[in-house]
Image (spheres, rainbow, N blue to C red):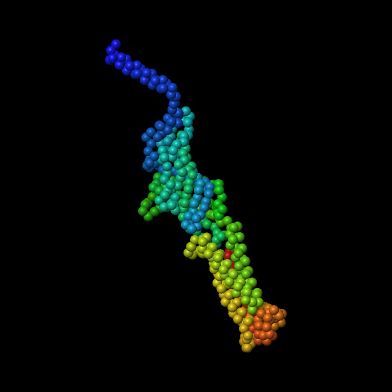
Amino acid sequence: MGKGHCLTLAVVFCLVQVCYTDDTSDSSRPVVTQTWVDKLKKDLLANYDRNLRPTQHFNVTSVDLKMTIRHVDIDEETSIFSVYGWVKMDWTDDKLKWNPAQYGNLDVIRTNPDSVWRPDLVLYNNARGSDNLHYGKTNVLIYHNGKVLWVPPTDYHSFCELNLRLWPFDYQTCFLKIGSWTYDGFKLNLTASENPEIDISVPNNEWSIRKVTTDRNIVYYKCCTEPYIDIQYNITLQRHTSTHKAIVISPAFVIMLLSLSVFWLPPHCGEKIVLNAVIILIVTIFLIYFAQQLPAMSGNTPLIVNFFSTTLYLVAISTITSVIVLRLARTRHFQPPSRVLKSQLDGCLGSVLGVSSGSGTLPSDEDKEASGGENIGDPKQRDWLRVATLIDRLIFVIYLIIYIISIIYYSL
């Protein structure tokens, strides 16, 4: 047998071996059977264009919108209102209808949202610039009658005009305005058949939802004759005040009481200046705290900030008054008070404020020592001391009235 003949036999043997191996491997592979879902999806989406509205151009596509709110937040520094939740959208797609009997009684399928047409609903008052990717990529449900249901998680960020005048007892009403970006009302009819559902998963430590209302608006722009429809959700939030009461409101009452108590110290007592200085320091610290916590907003400065700012001015005036009173009480006077002052001391005003000669408020021995010793026995010195006391108590009454009015005004 020649070498050529042997080579031919070897080649034939190898080919037979290869063919036998391929047949064996093919027979061992499992046979994949196409499901009804595969067949239905293939038939439905064979010539489907997801960029075109799924009905005749003269028909209207109705989209029903419902929102479920899971979490809310407000960034007061940037005036941005954030809502996290779910948005339920359903509409009818005339291109996605089938007879369930022809597909094993299959009446609903689930598929990627990018494979079908979706309404271009965006947040009109979006606070994230050109970013309108509000919705997550969850599957859509397609029913045999053409109904399409899409419930994606959503992340809305809108601008909100804040009014902090009543901070920290304020209510804020923010809104979300949602509508189609390119379709007018003759092409896409937007409805809200149900009120938003509030299902808070993680409560906000600062805010709680008090009320949610829904408005359906039809707007005509100057450029166009077609109506444009939007759904507006008005969300009213209330600030939690328990922490702020402990941090801000309680110290405000203490500061008020301290500033009033200054006027009940003896008129010759130098500690009046020290107490006023301590109050000024405390008020200044609170004003710095407010500057860090609250945004600078024109036209609606919080009343509590105005209260502390006014208190700062009042304590400054009180300090000046204390200096005058100390001067009157400690200086040795060679002339008695004027007849006008004398008449006030012994008249109705002196009696009401408890500084008349018969009121029993004459200085004690300690007062004599503090105000100049034996000089206090001089009738002129005693009268000037009564004048200083009159000024202190008169300013006390004025400050008390101012604080009462401030409390009533702030409460209203």
Up-down relation of residue 287 to residue 326 (above or below): above
Up-down relation of residue 26 to residue 150 (above or below): above
**Residue 209 x, y percent position in the rendering:** 55, 52
Answer whether residue 239 is visible to the viewer in this image.
yes
Q: Residue at x 63, y 74 (%)?
A: 271
Q: Residue at x 44, y 38 (%)?
A: 112
**Residue 311 x, y percent position in the rendering:** 57, 69
- Choose between 271 and 392: the one closer to the eye: 271
Answer whether residue 401 is visible to the viewer in this image.
no
Q: Please, which residue is most extreme toward the bottom here?
A: 335
Q: Residue at x 46, y 43 (%)?
A: 136
Q: Quadrant of residue 99?
A: top left
Q: Residue at x 60, y 64 (%)?
A: 251
Up-down relation of residue 67 to residue 319 (above or below): above
- Choose between 317 and 51: the one closer to the eye: 317
User: If the image is split into quadrants, where does the C terminus sit?
Assistant: bottom right
